[in-house]
Amino acid sequence: MNPIFLNPRAFDAVIIDLDGTMVDTMGDFVAALNLMLADLPAHYADLAPLEPALIREMVGKGSENLIRSVLAYAASVAPTKAAVDSSTDVFEWAFTRYQKHYAAINGRHAEVYPGVLTGLQAMREQGLRMACLTNKPLAFAQELLKDKGLDGFFSQVFGGDSFARKKPDPLPLLKTCAALSSLPARTLMLGDSSNDAIAARAAGCPVLLLTYGYNHGVPVTAVDADGFMDSMAQLCWREE
Ligand SMILES: O=C(O)COP(=O)(O)O
Ligand SMILES: [Mg+2]
């Protein structure tokens, strides 16, 4: 595993994404979405269960976007039902059902990625201030961090419903930098998708991306970022 050297003097804080960066939550998303669709028998009774590969392409821009993407997909593969959908606003109902199911299974089908604990411990040892910033709803994020034993690392946790806009808008990063009392240029963003990188660039934060996460089905190495790593354990903090 090749090390990625960072000078701790260059940074005061780190902002770390959750889904696809610290925790592989694809199993949770797939389970909650399939339970949601099963609750809509009038519309999607004959739909096959959604596969993780499909959901991987849809995750990243928050729950509302995810539900809208899934409903659009379901309508496209069940065209005879599409007419029903266009005459009925299933979104609100589906969203409520999804939240209920997700709350019940949150963390059950999810694993902390290898190297995350090592990476977080190394950042803590450097005295960096640490925040988790995710597009996941805040309540789900707090619950998941606690369930996986990661909550103690972060002085701040913000979710997709914490601010007026979500990543890739820079607003959540700027607000998180302010909460950490850290200038964007001295705040490192660690993420797994273009949403993290675009937000970081626009906010003026340096950004490194993990290669194993969810990037809307596009290779993450094609995203404009300052570097890429296969494991958070690659980060080596060394004064130059
Ligand atoms: O819930 C999502 O849409 C993605 O969440 P993330 O920002 O932690 O990757
Ligand atoms: Mg992510």
Image (tube, rainbow, N blue to C red):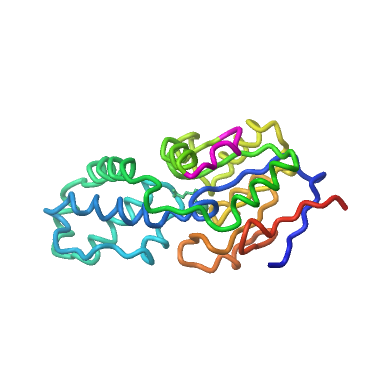
* Nearest the eye: 157 or 187: 157
Q: Position of residue 115 (x, y in %)?
A: 60, 56
Q: Position of residue 150 (x, y in %)?
A: 54, 42
Left or right: 219 in relation to 227: left
Which contiguous range is marked in magenta?
148-156
Q: Position of residue 35 (x, y in %)?
A: 24, 51
Question: What residue is at 43 percent from the left and 38 percent from the top?
Answer: 143
Question: What residue is at 41 percent from the left and 57 percent from the top?
Answer: 26
- Quadrant of the drawing holding the N terminus: bottom right
Left or right: 171 in relation to 9: left
* Nearest the eye: 222 or 51: 51
Question: What residue is at 88 percent from the left and 53 percent from the top?
Answer: 240
- Residue 212 painted magenta: no
Question: What residue is at 63 percent from the left and 31 percent from the top?
Answer: 179
Q: Position of residue 206 (x, y in %)?
A: 70, 51
Q: Quadrant of residue 232?
A: bottom right
Q: Quadrant of residue 21?
A: bottom right
- 114 over 159 or under it: above or below: below
**Of all residues shown, which one is farthest toward the left?**
42
Left or right: 96 in relation to 149: left
Number of numbered discs on residues: 0
* Nearest the eye: 208 or 145: 145
* Nearest the eye: 234 or 187: 234
Left or right: 210 in relation to 52: right
